[in-house]
Amino acid sequence: MSERADAVVIGAGILGASVAHFLTKLDFGEVVLLDKGAVCSGSTRYSAANVRQHYTNEVAIRLAVRAVAMFENDEAELGGPSGFVRCGYMVMAPAGEEKAIREVVPFQQSLGVQSEILAAGEVAARYPEIDVDGIELACLETTSGYADPVATTRSLVDSARRRGLRVHEGRAVTGIERKDGRITGVRTSDGTIAATVVVNAAGPWGDRVGRMAGVEHPLTFSREHEAQFELPPDFGELPVTSDAAQRLYFRPHGAGRLLVGEGWPKEVEADDPETYDAGTDDEHVARMTEKLFRRVPALRDRVRYVTGYSGMYDITADWYPIVGPEPEVEGLYSAFGGSGHCFKIGPPIGEALADVIVGREPAIDISSLRGSRFADDRTFSSVWGPGNRA
């Protein structure tokens, strides 16, 4: 005899955990969360976890503003600690790209982002460790920062467990069952679960899971490298910083460490989520290190490399996630294709999608994220061009 549930959520990364969390908050009957690995064992685990609000499009800005409020009040909103640190987020633009800041910051401010535009000299005055050579303009969000992706995801899942969520780790989905265009359940490595609602939050496996139900949403994949360095004692404060001139980002990483990664646009390092290497290599670390030393010269010969690793982006054609009901299959919902955005906006996406599933109108309209936007030619763009910067 098969198991039964009111909803099955596939994937226990940030999006799946968020949807499951908010479905249980709304008392949506029996909710099951499945993952072929473990909770937060996929791409979310290696997220840089920057919590910023610098976006071009209204839906993303509204989600990001809501996300900051959630991380600031994580015990109440996310069910437990998220490791959120409010240190600010700054984007620095070289000559020729400063127009992106001038155009988008007033729009962000109109939607509630606490951001200000800074000239290069003002950046140097606030953060004397940063060399502003080649920088024309910057914007600074004072309420943003970073969080711990593993702690956040586990808090979402653990709090939902206390409300009755059933979590099955190491249980792979092998098929999605349908009848007369409607979801009837999922087949797994440990039997079938009958359900009329299935949420595909499988991250880099989202395209494959979608195809099990006859839904096609192509993804590309990119391996993303990060490195951690030990800072010298009493080093000055830095915000989460996006250096558009060098396509680099860096941020504090707890007490005494700095996290560094390469930003977009850059060459895609194609890979497969089944086989990719979660480590990094000397070439990537050396390139990131040299860029860091150019921007923060006081660190040259004063930091110690600690560790490096790589995660994976599951990228849609317009660099925005696919979220919402799938019209071809009643009861099937998608929440994947994070494209490097979805740790920070994952919780409010989960909140809004849970509202849609139970038939409530969400506080933030996420209908523009639907998968049909590609066929309807209603895709997203960014003032920064292709990539996940905004």
Image (tube, rainbow, N blue to C red):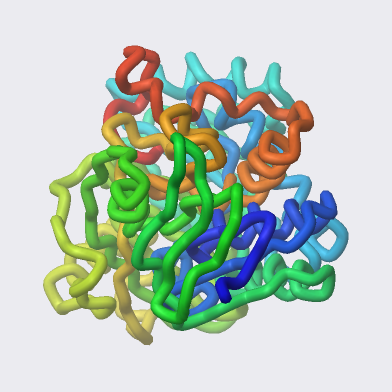
Quadrant of res 255: bottom right
Residue 140 at x, y percent in the picture: 59, 38
Task: Give the residue drawn at x 39%, y 43%.
Answer: 132
Q: Is residue 107 visible?
A: yes
Q: Nearer the viewer, residue 116 or 227?
A: 227
The residue located at (68%, 74%) in the rendering is 166
Q: Residue furthest front?
A: 1
The residue that appears at 42% across and 58% down in the rendered structure is 202
Q: Is residue 234 visible?
A: no
Above or below residue 203? Residue 112 is: above
Q: Nearer the viewer, residue 9 or 346?
A: 9
Q: Is residue 343 left or right of residue 160?
A: left
Observer-nearest of 122 and 5: 5
Find residue 29 and report its horizontal and vertical position in percent: 78, 57
Give how far across and how far down residue 123 sits, in percent: 53, 41
Task: Report x, y in % for residue 191.
Answer: 47, 76
Q: Quadrant of the C terminus?
A: top left
